[in-house]
Image: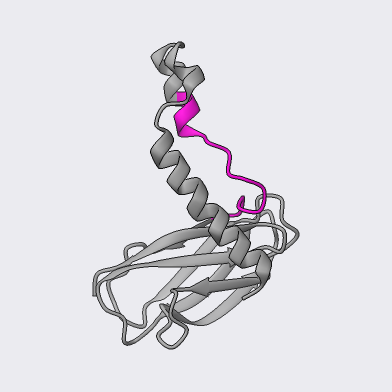
């Protein structure tokens, strides 16, 4: 895994933790409820962690089921790689195929590992300058 991907993953984890601890921003405490909701609903991710992705279907319900990963690179140049799960010996997804690497709208196809069980696992995208992560839920 490249240093950029590891740095982006660490940045995503740090951002998620800080957003969870921060609660309502200080500026929103003196404003109206609508302003506070808007401020909390659209936090801007840090540079390096702006790629956005979705997995469909999610949750998955069958082993070896094909899933589609779509999204955008959030300012990155192009989709370079997709990683699924944390353990390389037992991957979450197999046969990962980048169908379209367009940074404004990428498409990836993959199959759920035949040995997967019930649970949650991360799916990461590497867009060069930007990275993103989402969770895939399995009910098999």
In this view of the protein, which residue sits in the foreground, 39 or 71? 39
Residue 107 lies left or right of residue 35; in this view the side is: right
Figure quadrant of the C terminus: bottom left
The residue shown at (44%, 21%) is 36
Task: Please tell me whether residue 45 belongs to the stretch shown in magenta.
Answer: yes
Q: How many marks?
A: 0
The residue shown at (57%, 72%) is 82
Residue 116 lies left or right of residue 1; in this view the side is: left
Figure quadrant of the N terminus: bottom right
> At which x and y percent is residue 22?
43, 34
- Image quadrant of residue 119? bottom left
In this view of the protein, which residue sits in the foreground, 90 or 103? 90
Q: Main secondary structure of the magenta part?
A: loop
> At which x and y percent is residue 76?
72, 56
What colour scheme has been applied to the protein in the rendered image? Answer: one colour
Q: Which residues are magenta?
A: 38-52
Task: Please tell me whether residue 28 belongs to the stretch shown in magenta.
Answer: no
The residue shown at (66%, 57%) is 130
Question: Is residue 73 placed above or below 25 in the rendered structure?
Answer: below
Question: Is residue 66 placed above or below 128 in the rendered structure?
Answer: below
Q: Residue furthest right?
A: 77
The residue shown at (58%, 78%) is 97
- Image quadrant of residue 96? bottom right
> At which x and y percent is residue 138?
30, 69
Question: Is residue 17 placed above or below 21 in the rendered structure?
Answer: below
> At which x and y percent is residue 118?
24, 73
């Amino acid at each position: 895994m490249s240093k950029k991907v590891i740095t982006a993953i660490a940045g995503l984890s740090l951002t998620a933790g800080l957003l969870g601890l921060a609660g309502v921003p200080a500026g929103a405490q003196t404003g109206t409820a609508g302003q506070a909701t808007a401020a909390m609903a659209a936090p801007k991710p840090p540079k390096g962690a702006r790629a956005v992705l979705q997995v469909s279907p999610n949750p998955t319900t069958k082993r070896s089921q094909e899933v589609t990963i779509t999204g955008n690179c959030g300012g990155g140049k192009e989709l370079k790689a997709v990683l699924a799960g944390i353990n390389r010996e037992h991957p979450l997804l197999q046969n990962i195929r980048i169908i379209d690497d367009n940074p404004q709208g990428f498409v990836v196809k993959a199959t759920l590992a035949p040995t997967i069980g019930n649970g949650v696992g991360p799916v990461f995208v590497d867009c060069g300058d930007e990275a993103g992560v989402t969770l895939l839920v399995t009910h098999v």
